[in-house]
């Protein structure tokens, strides 16, 4: 079998790929691995467990809590909160482990398990590999030492997490949002409560859509992967801007007052300039992935800001930021990390900071986002192929070389296997949108032919 952990935890169809038994087993394994690593030494271990509103999150939450408690870990159940809230609480509550149950922007039938280490940071790859190995050994019958009596873990609801997270968001805002009208699309997800509360307390007039989660409607035609409703609502209500989250609210995309999308690259550009103005952009550097639009790089160069690029995945952005002490990084998809205030992408924080820049500058989001010009970029997802052979297929390499020769210095090509879904992503940039579409279409066909 392949590696269970992708770039963002373990994901699959809930109760088919990701079962209650797996959730329990992975939690037990995580507790054992962290104990062996000395994380629990000298104290009674404690974990924070949260989830998004998916119906399957209810039984998976119960399984995770049971697994941790059976391994001697006390569990604080924070309920439905965004991924960055669980990471934040893991740090501020001094927990040894955080667990978030969510499949982020994926459709409702999917779910996932993401582990956070002490401090609210994502687990290192080697710890995930060790957890997977221990899980497999237990699953195949290797016995493990089970605490009894007072040694078992205790479960406790922790309702204070909502207020603590909202308070944190408001405490780091550079200025209030008074005078702004903002539409929030919560994707019927984990931020449906905290995001409207934070924006309202910050002074904005708030209109919400997608803020009635029922366990079944998460990401359903709304949120950061479906901006149509938000675009229409911003125009209808005459709002200054719109903010869209995904199911677990670790990402943020925006819409300007005309209904035009403002993507993650543009958000990064706006925040980079705002942070530099406040002397908060360390080394005048922003970190992004190789998927960032070429126009973003050119815009940052023109503004005198250095761009450092990493492999795709917010974990790689975060690693580079931590390695060199950079303050801002993110992805075109809307994962934005402001490392002084968050250990992971935080869609609510990003939206608040973006709105704060609009309020402080007195300029529209459309004008602020014009600091960069997006070059035409076409992204095609090719499903049902062997994504493991992307880098080894000679036929595919030849197709890429031919595309690169055609585009020359005015464009670029990027093929990569998805870290969270069974597909290959084909990205083509060119000065002309029709050329980008044509090249991307041919490459998508080449992927199907070579890897199908």
Image (cartoon, helix red, strand yellow):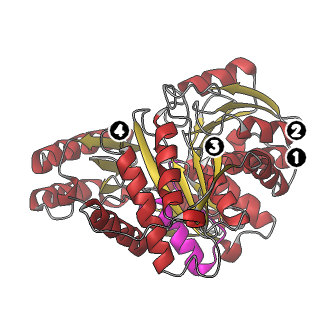
Q: Residues within 10 Å of mark 4 (few under 14, many from 20)?
A: some
The residue at which mark 1 appears reads as: 176
Locate residue 110 relative to residue 184 in the image: left or right. Answer: left
Q: Residues within 10 Å of mark 3 (few under 14, many from 20)?
A: many
User: Does the CB distance between marks 2 and 1 fall below 8 Å?
Assistant: yes
Numbered disc 4: secondary structure:
loop
Q: Residue furthest top?
A: 236
Numbered disc 3: secondary structure:
strand
User: Toward the viewer: 382 or 123?
Assistant: 123
Residue shown at the point (22%, 53%) measured from the top left? 387
Q: Does residue 421 show up magenta in the picture?
A: no
Numbered disc 1: secondary structure:
loop
Q: CA distance from mark 3 to mark 4?
A: 20 Å
Q: CA distance from mark 3 to mark 1?
A: 29 Å
What segment carries the magenta color? Answer: 312-333
Locate residue 301 relative to residue 94 in the image: left or right. Answer: left
Q: CA distance from mark 2 to mark 1?
A: 6 Å
Numbered disc 2: secondary structure:
loop
Q: CA distance from mark 1 to mark 4?
A: 44 Å
Which mark is first along the chain, 2 or 3? 3
The residue at which mark 4 appears reads as: 15
Q: Position of residue 135 (x, y in %)?
A: 34, 63
The residue at which mark 2 appears reads as: 203
Q: Nearer the viewer, mark 1 or mark 4?
A: 4
Q: CA distance from mark 3 to mark 2?
A: 27 Å
Q: Nearer the viewer, mark 4 or mark 2?
A: 4
User: Does the CB distance between marks 3 and 2 fall below 8 Å?
Assistant: no
């Amino acid at each position: 079998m392949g590696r269970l952990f992708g770039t963002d935890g373990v994901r699959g169809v809930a109760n088919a790929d990701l079962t209650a038994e797996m959730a329990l087993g992975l939690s037990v394994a995580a507790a054992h691995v962290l104990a062996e690593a000395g994380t629990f030494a000298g104290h009674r271990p404690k974990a924070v467990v949260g989830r998004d509103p998916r119906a399957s999150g209810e039984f998976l939450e119960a399984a995770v809590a049971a697994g941790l408690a059976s391994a001697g870990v006390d569990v604080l159940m924070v309920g439905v909160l965004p991924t960055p809230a669980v990471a934040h609480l893991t740090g501020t509550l001094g927990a040894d482990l955080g667990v978030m149950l969510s499949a982020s922007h994926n459709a409702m039938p999917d779910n996932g398990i993401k582990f956070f280490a002490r401090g609210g940071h994502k687990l290192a790859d080697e710890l995930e590999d060790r957890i997977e190995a221990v899980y497999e050994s237990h699953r195949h019958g290797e016995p493990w030492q089970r605490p009894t009596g007072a040694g078992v873990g205790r479960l406790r609801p922790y309702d204070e997490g909502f207020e603590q997270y909202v308070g944190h968001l408001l405490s780091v805002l550079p200025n209030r949002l008074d005078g702004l009208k903002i539409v929030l699309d919560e994707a019927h997800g984990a931020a449906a409560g905290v995001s409207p509360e934070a924006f309202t307390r910050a002074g904005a007039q708030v209109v919400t859509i997608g803020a009635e989660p029922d366990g079944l409607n998460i990401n359903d035609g709304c949120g950061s992967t479906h901006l149509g409703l938000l675009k229409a609502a911003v125009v209808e209500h005459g709002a200054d801007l719109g903010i869209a989250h995904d199911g677990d609210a670790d990402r943020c995309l925006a819409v300007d007052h005309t209904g035009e999308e403002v993507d993650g690259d543009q958000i990064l550009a706006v925040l980079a300039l705002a942070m530099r103005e406040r002397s908060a952009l360390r080394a005048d550097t922003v970190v992004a992935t190789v998927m960032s639009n070429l126009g973003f790089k050119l815009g940052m160069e023109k503004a005198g800001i250095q761009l450092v690029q990493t492999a795709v995945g917010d974990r790689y952005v975060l690693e580079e930021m931590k390695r060199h002490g950079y303050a801002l990084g993110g992805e075109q998809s809307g994962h934005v990390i402001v490392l002084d205030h968050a250990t992971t992408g935080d869609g609510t924080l990003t939206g608040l900071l973006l709105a704060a820049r609009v309020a402080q500058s007195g300029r529209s989001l459309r004008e602020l986002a014009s600091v960069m010009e997006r070059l035409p970029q076409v992204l095609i997802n090719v499903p049902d192929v062997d994504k493991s052979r992307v880098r080894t297929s000679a036929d595919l390499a030849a197709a890429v070389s031919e595309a690169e020769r055609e585009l020359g210095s005015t464009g670029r090509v990027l093929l990569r296997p998805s870290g969270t879904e069974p597909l290959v992503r084909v990205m083509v940039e060119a000065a002309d949108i029709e050329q980008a579409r044509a090249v991307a279409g041919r490459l998508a066909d080449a992927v199907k032919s070579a890897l199908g």
